[in-house]
Amino acid sequence: MSAVLEVSEIKKNFGGISAVDGVSFDVREGEILGLIGPNGCGKSTLFNCILGQLTPSGGEVKLDGKLVTGLRPAELNKLGVSRTFQLLQVFPKLSVRENLILAGQEHQGNMASRLVGRSDAGLTEAANQMIGFFKLDHLADEPAGGLSYGQQKLLDAAMAFMGGPRLVLLDEPAGGVNPSMLVDLKDRLVAINREKNATFVVIEHNMEFVMSLCSRVMVMAEGKVLAMGRPDEVRKNPAVIEAYLGH
Amino acid sequence: MSSFGKPLKIALGLAVIAALIIVPMNFNRYGLFILSQWAVMSIAAMGLNLTLGYAGQVSLAQGAFVGIGAYAAAIMTTHGWPLPAAILVAIALSFAVGWVLGYPALRVQHHYLAFVTLAFSTLAFLVFRNESWLTGGIYGISNIPRPHIFGIATNKPLPFYYVCLGSLAIVSLAVWWLIRSPWGRAFMALRENPLRAQSLGIDTRRYTLMAFAIGSALGGIAGALYAPLTQYIDPVPFNLSLSLDLLMMVIVGGAGFYFGPFLGAMIAVLLPEWLRFTEGYYLMLYAIAVMLLLIWSPTGILGILDRYLAERRTKAASALRAVAKSRLETVQ
């Protein structure tokens, strides 16, 4: 399997603190890579460096072998890299359907066709499918701000898939989602991973969720990679138990 | 607005349009002037509503763009150019200047952006006043002609009112199209969550500049109509207070609501006339009314309506749920 994403020696300093300190890893085509580690170990900062939200202090990011370090988030998204956020990031005043259309519209046509063409950019059908897929049917016309936290999390994830991304970075998708909805969310992610051949990197604290969802898990501590391997290997790794999982 | 029903909304819209065409036929010169001014200010406020209400970019410079449009039209038409050509130049000029003014918005937001645009507003006023070789300085430009449209002279107040009303109709349609296009959705994304917008591939830089440029261009159109409406312009009407007036129209009407600017402009232009009987107290009453309104509904007049309709929808929805639940219980 070839690498979709190659990250080498990424560093990010905030003043005197080095939040990410020389992290290197590959993400293989079609895999679900888990990213775990204690709070403040640099997971989200690493995401932000990969996605162009932060400029790394050093290192390189390659997408399909092409250097993409320093590209703006919108440009990376056009290349098929999408994300969700740790904190809720939906558009509260727009309806659920409008949120999804918005999430996909920049992948349709060009600036001119988006001005003079159809108001839904031809995405109503796709948005409705996504709404059905994430079981949000009864909420399609509600403003997103009126949804429950868990439902907004689902919408947030659904939005990340509207542009038909090849690589999706999910930042704590399970945080604050109730257990029954969590099973749904996992099923949806696995289904999209298989059917659409989308590659995922998932930051998550819910161990059960990570261990059952991911094919490989990377553990970070203090801005560095501590371990990388299959979930069962990582779970047994003494250094990981020491730093994160506990005894 | 969904609970109104589509046919009723269309009927209401047609009635308002018919009234705007028919009723003013009996108006005197002054009444027609006020109504034309409403149409012109609605256009400018609609532009600001786009920049501020939809895209969330604060601007205290809309009055300056009205000035730019007005001077462009005054200079060109007094040199023999037809008004439509002058309007096109006004659009192009204010679009370009608006685009450039959008660049600070890529770096600063909110109050800081307000100050940048405020400085621009002052700068524009100084140009209007001091560059007398072009603008006539404090003496202004007089004898601005009114156009012939399809061979019909619009010198008289009524025909020119129809020019203003027609322009308002065209601009309204264009803005309606714009805000329900993907562009409109992207503008709202800028306002609500630029960070998320970026991660969804929305080029926030380009859309921010566009929001400024298009909003400013509408200010330019309003100015290009204002000049032949008053037939005399000097720098004073285009100082900062016009920008503040337009800002108030947008906020009072309801920022981010399509009909907000029409309503806001109506209040700002007509209310002083209605309150004329109070003589010296008019401004005080006006100020108090605005303060009370914004305390009651920070989202403006249409915000009140919006809240009311949302409450009704919620009530209707919970009533439906209750019915469904009781049915479920009887089945069991």
Image: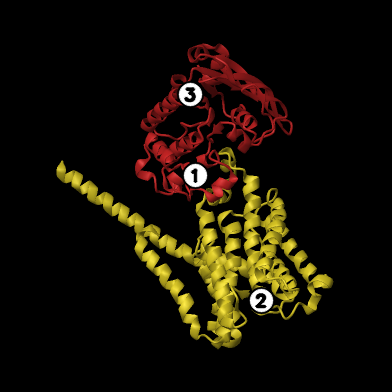
Establish if A58 lies above or below B186.
above
Q: Position of residue A238 (x, y in %)?
A: 55, 12
Tell me the distance, in whole angstroms, between the alpha carbons under discs 1 and 2: 40 Å
Q: Position of residue B114 (x, y in %)?
A: 68, 59
Establish if A177 lies above or below B101.
above
Tell me the distance, in whole angstroms, between the alpha carbons under discs 3 and 1: 24 Å
Given the image, on which type of amino acid does mark 2 rest?
A: Pro
* Residue on which disc 2 sits: B228
Tell me the distance, in whole angstroms, between the alpha carbons under discs 3 and 2: 62 Å
Quadrant in which the C terminus of chain B is drawn = top left
Question: Mark 3 against mark 2, which lies toward the viewer?
Answer: 2
Given residues A168 and B218, the one toward you in this image is: B218
Circle 2 Cα neighbour tier, 10 Å, few/some/many (<14 / 14–19 / ≥20)? many
* Residue on which disc 3 sits: A197
What shade has chain B been given?
A: yellow
Same chain, marks 3 and 1? Answer: yes
Question: Mark 3 against mark 1, which lies toward the viewer?
Answer: 1
Establish if A160 lies above or below B45.
above
> In the displayed image of the protein, which residue is found farthest to the front?
B151
Same chain, marks 3 and 2? Answer: no
* Residue on which disc 1 sits: A121
Q: Quadrant of residue B330?
A: top left
Q: Are marks 3 and 1 in contact (CB under 8 Å)?
A: no
Quadrant in which the N terminus of chain B is drawn = bottom left
Numbered disc 3: secondary structure: loop
Chain that appears red? A
Q: Name the residue located 41 percent from the left edge and 43 percent from the top edge.
A: A148
